Image (cartoon, grey):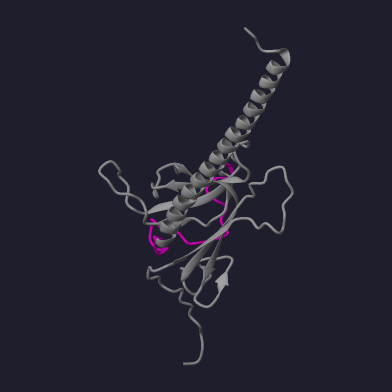
Amino acid sequence: MRGFTLIELLLAISIFAIVLVAANSILFGVLRLRNRTMDRITQATDLERASTIIRRDIAGIVVPTGKLTGVLQSESDGLDSGQGKPVSPIFYTNTGLIDDRSRWAEIQKVIYYLRTPTNQVSAPGLDLVRTVTRNLLPATQEQFEDQWLLGGVEQLTFTYYDGTQWQTSWNSTNQVSVLPRAIKVELLLASQNTGQKKNASQPQTSVQWVVPILVAADTNQTQIAGVR
């Protein structure tokens, strides 16, 4: 009975090795494609959730009068310097949920921060965090709750429409109207090309939302002395 020669065995092993290398490349290529797809789906889901929450907070702004509300002022130092970089004014909004287990009303204080992520390896950019307090008349120190919204954020900006033009800042005590007619939010995502130089021909992902302010707000009345 004739067996295999050494050359035939070496040839068979070589062919088998080539097939394994090709299959391995295809398998890992499919896995990388799957991971990128899942990352994009997750980011899109988080972005949609963050968009819904931000727009709801802005749409629910209450008139800055009374004990449970404050002025809308874009130049805010934030709630705590240790929270991160504040990127929004403090919103007094009626988006708090009322249920049998909560003793608070619907009005809550909300501010948005950009923070350095705890896991820098996961993705470039900063984390967008929503900080909320519902006890607006604390006996001692205010207690805040953090809600992570989105990762991979480079910049978040707010602009304010006064009825004629967009303004980069707002102060309810200095404006003719205590609240703007609309607020525009622009979110810039960080580049995913880590380890590479930024290419001007490849613009970063930017999304914008314009939220009208429908609540009826009083105007700041200024008495002007003059001849009647």
**212 left or right of 89?**
left
Q: Nearer the viewer, residue 76 or 99?
A: 99
Q: Residue furthest top?
A: 1
Q: Nearer the viewer, residue 228 or 23?
A: 23
Q: Which stretch appears magenta?
A: 60-82
Is residue 181 shown above or below 207?
A: below
Whether the magenta-drawn stretch holds residue 81 is answered as yes
* Residue drawn at the location 40% of the way across and 64% of the way down: 63
Is residue 178 shown above or below 70?
A: below
* Residue drawn at the location 70% of the way across and 59% of the way down: 201
Residue 212 at x, y percent in the picture: 44, 68
* Residue drawn at the location 70% of the way across and 21% of the way down: 11
Residue 21 at x, y percent in the picture: 65, 29
Choose top left, top right, bottom left or bottom right for residue 202: bottom right
* Residue drawn at the location 69% of the way across and 23% of the way down: 14
**127 left or right of 141?**
right
Whether the magenta-drawn stretch holds residue 195 is answered as no
Q: Residue furthest front?
A: 1
Q: Quadrant of the N terminus?
A: top right
